[in-house]
Image: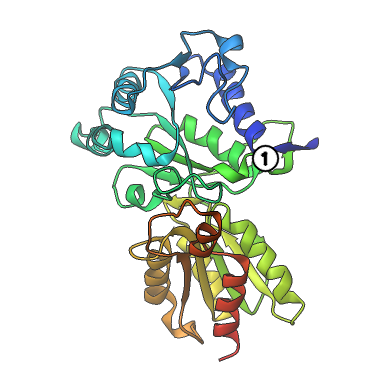
Amino acid sequence: MAIREISYRDAINEALREEMERDPTVCIFGEDVGRYGGPFQVTRGLYERFGEWRVRDTPISEEGFTGMAVGAAMTGLRPVVEIMYNDFVTLAMDQIINQAAKARYMFGGKARVPMVIRTQGGAGRGNAAQHSQSLEMWFVHIPGLIVIQPSTPYDAKGLLKSAIRNDNPVIFIEHKLLYITTGPVPEEEYLIPIGVADIKRAGDDVTIVATSRMVHFALQAAGELEKEGIQAEVIDPRTLKPLDIETIVRSVKKTGRLVVVNEGHLTGGFTAEVAARVQREAFDWLDAPIMQVATEDVPIPYNRQLEWEAMPSAADIIQAVKSVVYR
């Protein structure tokens, strides 16, 4: 397959374009997604290519255009909704939680809701407490929703294409600071199956499970730990729900140690969910307590120094790994 280096932003744009060309029922709704090309320029060029009927600029009403997408999905379209900053999903929770997530179940499987909600999460830009949150676990908690957090351009493109073709509502969370990152992406079409984790780096001494941008921090930490003779295995779940717990448990049974890293808050977060499930399924293989590395339980500060102090870092991951390896 022909491979080129493209950005995370361009990989998502390609996935949208290819799926719109393949399937005329795929359409895009959101604020400034049309002529402007999206708040993060992910949809640029699509309005010119497919026109205003398939790339719809909407009023500033998350509840309104998300509800419109739910109805469109139930009546034959495959809408891709962009909610600018995942902090703003609070304004559309009724449509997402009580309508999109439950329609197929409540209609006995006779209704489908094939829609994707693309949104941007994460901190690190100094956007303050109302524009920097990581709310993925809100959606993981809800039956009927699929939750995806890709960390690389390759994963972003392949998973978005799979999400658009899925007949269930998908929450697709993109980290704002990953848009400019680059990576290898095939020119030929490919799909990544939903619910399959990826081992980003093999190792025998400790398992590090990390999500979204934290995958890059985990790989950085693994590189530093290798200098001290510690071989860390880095696993990216890619899909938070359904979670590929089998791959994680298999790794923990090999290494005997686990560190879980997520940018969401510590209490009630993804790190706690993974820790609980591994504790239940691989307790006898653990040689040390499971360590969690997550954002402090505080609103994300505006001050850049405080923001970075609140968030997980590669140094935090290294410290957590050493605490389980050097017991």
Q: Which residue is mark 1?
A: 180
Colour approach in the figure? rainbow
Q: Residue at x 34, y 47 (%)?
A: 139
Quarter of the rendering occupied by the N terminus:
top right
Q: Amino acid at mark 1?
A: Ile
Q: Residue at x 43, y 72 (%)?
A: 278
Could you tell me residue 313's position as x and y percent? 58, 65
Give the residue furthest to the front: 303
Q: Residue at x 48, y 30 (%)?
A: 165
Q: Residue at x 51, y 50 (%)?
A: 123
Could you tell me residue 90's position as x and y percent? 30, 39
Position of 143 with respect to 9 (left or right) is left
Q: Helix or strand or loop: what does disc 1 sit on?
A: loop
Quarter of the rendering occupied by the C terminus:
bottom right
The answer to whether residue 291 is above or below residue 186 is below
Could you tell me residue 251's position as x and y percent? 56, 71
